[in-house]
């Protein structure tokens, strides 16, 4: 992959990382504010619990994306960016443009997803 393309992707990753950190801080502050407000009745307590759970889940996915971005930035620094972590072959530039923190080429990612689907428990109502 060309150096200027990697530099462009790195710039995009750093911007997305900063955006996610800001979002995470805002959500954490919102969750803390819900706790500090004090809740006047049972209905409000239930709604507050639901909102806190939702904020927590959103924050967890934000943290996971930040970790994937950090891993991609490390691969850029180590000269390993753009190589599939499974087969070692180059990841298509088009894939990296869409998903700059991708760790696997399309073929390896599809194989990984098939393996994970085999190991997953059956969905509710299905055997």
Image (cartoon, grey):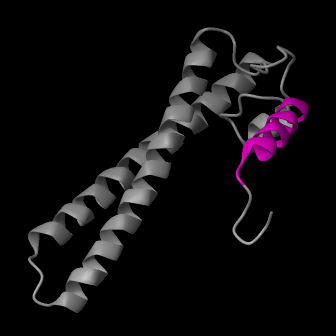
Identify the main secondary structure in magenta.
helix
Answer left or right for 48 relative to 82.
left
- Whether residue 34 is visible, yes or no, is yes
| 24 vs 43: above or below | above
Quadrant, the N terminus? top right
The one nearer the camera, 126 or 60, is 126
Task: Please state which of residues 115 and 76 is positioned toward the viewer in this rendering.
Answer: 115
- The residue positioned 31% from the left and 67% from the top of the image is 52
Q: Residue furthest front?
A: 127
Q: Is residue 65 above or below residue 105?
A: below
Magenta segment boundaries in residue numbering:
106-121
Q: Is residue 87 above or below residue 21?
A: above
Q: Which of the pair 117/104 is nearer the observer?
A: 117
**Residue that appears at 51% across and 28% down:** 70
Judge whether residue 19 can be spotted in this image: no
24 left or right, relative to 35: right
């Amino acid at each position: 992959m060309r150096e200027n393309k990697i530099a462009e992707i790195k710039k995009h990753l750093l911007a997305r990382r900063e955006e996610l950190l800001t979002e995470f801080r805002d959500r954490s502050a919102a969750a803390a504010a819900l706790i500090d407000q004090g809740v006047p009745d049972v209905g409000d307590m239930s709604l507050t619990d639901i909102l806190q759970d939702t904020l927590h889940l959103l924050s967890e996915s934000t943290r996971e994306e930040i970790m994937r971005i950090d891993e991609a930035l490390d691969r850029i620094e180590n000269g390993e960016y753009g190589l599939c972590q499974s087969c070692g072959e180059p990841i298509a530039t088009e894939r990296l443009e869409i998903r700059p923190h991708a760790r696997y080429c399309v073929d390896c990612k599809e194989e990984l997803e098939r393996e994970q689907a085999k190991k997953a428990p059956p969905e509710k109502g299905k055997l």
